[in-house]
Amino acid sequence: MTANTPVPFLDLVTQHRRMETELVAVFSDALRSARFIGGPAVEKFETNFAAFCTTRFCAGVASGTDALRFALIAAGVNPGDGVITVPNTFAATVEAILQAGASPAFVDVDEKSCNMDMERLAHYLDTRCMLEKSSGRLVHRESGRPVTAVLPVHLYGQMVDMDAILDLAEQYNLLVIEDACQAHGAEHFSRRENRWKKAGSLGDAAAFSFYPGKNLGGCGDGGAVVTSDARIARTVTMLREHGQAEKHYHDIHGYTGRLDAIMAGLLDVKLAHLEEWNQVRRRHAQHYRRLLGASESVGTPDEAPWARSVYHLYVIRSARRDALQRHLHQRGIASGLHYPIPLHLQKAYGSLGYKEGDFPVSERLAKEILSLPMYPELHSEQIARVSEEVIHFSESQTGPATEAPPPRGHEHRGSAIFPI
Ligand SMILES: Cc1ncc(COP(=O)(O)O)c(C=O)c1O
């Protein structure tokens, strides 16, 4: 590796080369048995992933978006209900709420963690909602709409303050569905239980994505719902299978939403490495922090004392983000934006009625965040090189940061897949 060797945003090829024999064996077995849908490969992965998440059940589904949608429906969110989430997340979080027939309501995120701000959530529940005396239901004061769930997103690999969420959920009678699509193996120290708990094991149910670039990624799309509630698990298995618990008996409206057997087999091979990969990501994050922490013009990710992030993404902040990204790009260093337009300002969600200025922290983050290369196969020399370029750029800038908005499509996509 020379000083000019490009640094990709993500390197799945190296990972796959290292385990090629095992991965190819999964394909060969599937071709020979022709078990492509359901069967032992899916069941084995589900058992192992539930054990990894320390939940009683896991149901493999076709994507993280399906996992969110099925978890919401199975947990009891009805069409017309309100579901509270954040604008600083991937679009799928909101897509799933809308696909379940519910209506998303946003609260802003916290400046440090970039995750749901608990004070803002408490304020929203206190001032915008009320508990109906007759039914005990929480309703939105203005619309009269029942508000039935909160959907915290463990963004970038760090969990939301789940103790605070669970306290509020109890107080306001809310379901909690975790969006753990970026947080496979992340942990949260539960002050309630005085122990570390895994992402997915705290809410009523949780959704994971196995999109290729995730900490646990397949060779295509995939997802899972984990839960310790037998009724939710059973309903998810029906939803993914056209509403059937038994062949030919369609008891509820369902979907084609299964995890393929080949994907489950591939994921099971990779799952054996996940704990180790997450440790390596944490070491990489420490390395970045050591090198970048000295610069005042670069904001490094904050890890709460009660959180063990698995650094799905390593997201820094810079007032001159777009110029910094161009600088890195010119030197062969790929980077990403997660996410440059908060969801309340996306065209698709205009009908929700939000406007610029409604969620100032999310809007500020959208302008300042930059995701640096982060994956287990990254070398320390590459981290040093990326950091050196970030520091070099940042220290050479003087005067106020006034940036023109980035041209559409400027974001470096890294490879054929978009690491979302
Ligand atoms: C936070 C978040 N939620 C939901 C999803 C949806 O997952 P999928 O792409 O597998 O549908 C993703 C990732 O893609 C995500 O990052």
Image (cartoon, grey):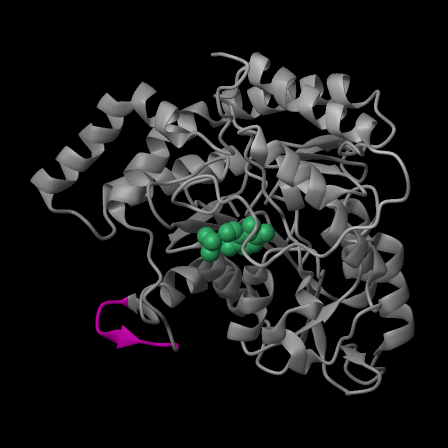
Q: Position of residue 278 (x, y in %)?
A: 56, 26
- Left or right of residue 175: residue 127: right
Nearest the eye: 412 or 268: 412
Residue 343 position (above or below residue 376)? below
Q: Nearer the viewer, residue 323 or 236?
A: 323
Residue 37 location in percent, x, y? 22, 53
Left or right? Give the position of 15 relative to 34. Answer: right
- Which of the 4 image quadrants contains residue 257? bottom left
Inspect this view and state whether residue 115 appears. Answer: no
Q: Does residue 187 lie above or below 121 as drawn?
A: above
Q: Which residues are magenta?
A: 246-252
Would residue 273 be seen by someone viewing this image from the given angle?
A: yes
- Magenta highlight on residue 2: no
Quadrant position of residue 172: bottom right
Query: Which residue is pictured at 66% across the width and 82% down the height?
Result: 351
For image coordinates 54% across by 68% down, the residue present is: 95
Residue at the (19%, 49%) spot, across then down: 36
Query: What x and y, as percent, mark residue 392?
Result: 74, 23
Q: Is residue 337 left or right of residue 272?
A: right
**Image coords of residue 193 (percent x, y):** 76, 36
The residue lying toward the viewer, choosing from 265 and 313, is 313
